[in-house]
Amino acid sequence: MSATADSTNDWRRNLVEDSEGIREMLAETRRIAVLGIKTEEQSYQPAFYVPKYLASAGFEIIPVPVYYPEATSILGQKVYRKLVDVPDEIDMVNVFRRSQDINAHLNDMLAKKPKAVWFQSGIRNDAVAERLAREGIKVVQDRCLMVEHRWLG
């Protein structure tokens, strides 16, 4: 493979699909913005109980709900309406949006430039994943962050 072809495919290394890559990503993660988080009233839904688990595991959770305009706090943390409104750096964006709805959040994610973006189980958007990966952002698709964290310990 030529050097040009090799550098053209470098971005593919940011598409994380193996346990070792996920383990490294989690080791570098402290602050997780949860895009599409639900409120306490929806505590039975993964978009609430996964971030709640992550908070109990020691991660700082930043709620970024898409709905619930009346919510000002979730899991005891201040709510932000867009990722770019979060004043601190974000290590990871955990996405709870339908695959087709992720496109609307791409510019917000690119502007905030987290180290990683994690699309939860059942969520896959290859075009957005490629765009993020080409910008140097690590991407996991169609996996549950809670399950992976428990499994990798």
Image (cartoon, rainbow, N blue to C red):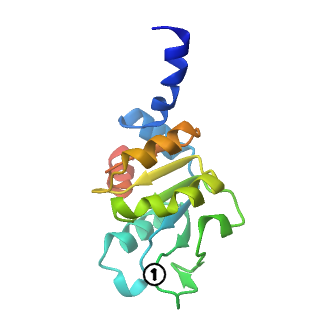
Q: Amino acid at mark 1?
A: Tyr
Along the viewing direction, whichever of 76 and 63 lies nearer the viewer: 63
Q: Position of residue 126 (x, y in %)?
A: 37, 45
* Element marked by disc 1: loop
**Horizontal arrangement in the rendering, residue 61 relative to residue 94 (left or right):** right
Q: In the displayed structure, would residue 7 be above or below residue 119? A: above
Q: Residue at x 70, y 62 (%)?
A: 88
Along the viewing direction, whichever of 60 and 83 lies nearer the viewer: 83
Q: Which residue is mark 1?
A: 67
**Horizontal arrangement in the rendering, residue 18 relative to residue 36 (left or right):** left
Q: In the displayed structure, would residue 123 be above or below residue 96? A: above
Q: Residue at x 47, y 66 (%)?
A: 56
Q: Please, which residue is most extreme toward the right here? A: 87
Q: Please, which residue is most extreme toward the top here? A: 2
Give the quadrant of the N terminus: top left
Q: Position of residue 3 (x, y in %)?
A: 55, 10
Q: Residue at x 31, y 75 (%)?
A: 45
Q: Position of residue 73 (x, y in %)?
A: 56, 83
Based on the displayed image, in which of its 4 quarters is residue 127 positioned?
Answer: top left
Q: Please, which residue is most extreme toward the bottom here? A: 70
Q: Position of residue 87 (x, y in %)?
A: 72, 66
- The number of numbered badges drawn on the structure is 1
| Neighbour tally class for label 1: few under 14, some 14-19, many 20 plus, Cα within 10 Å | few
Q: Residue at x 42, y 37 (%)?
A: 16
**Horizontal arrangement in the rendering, residue 52 relative to residue 42 (left or right):** right
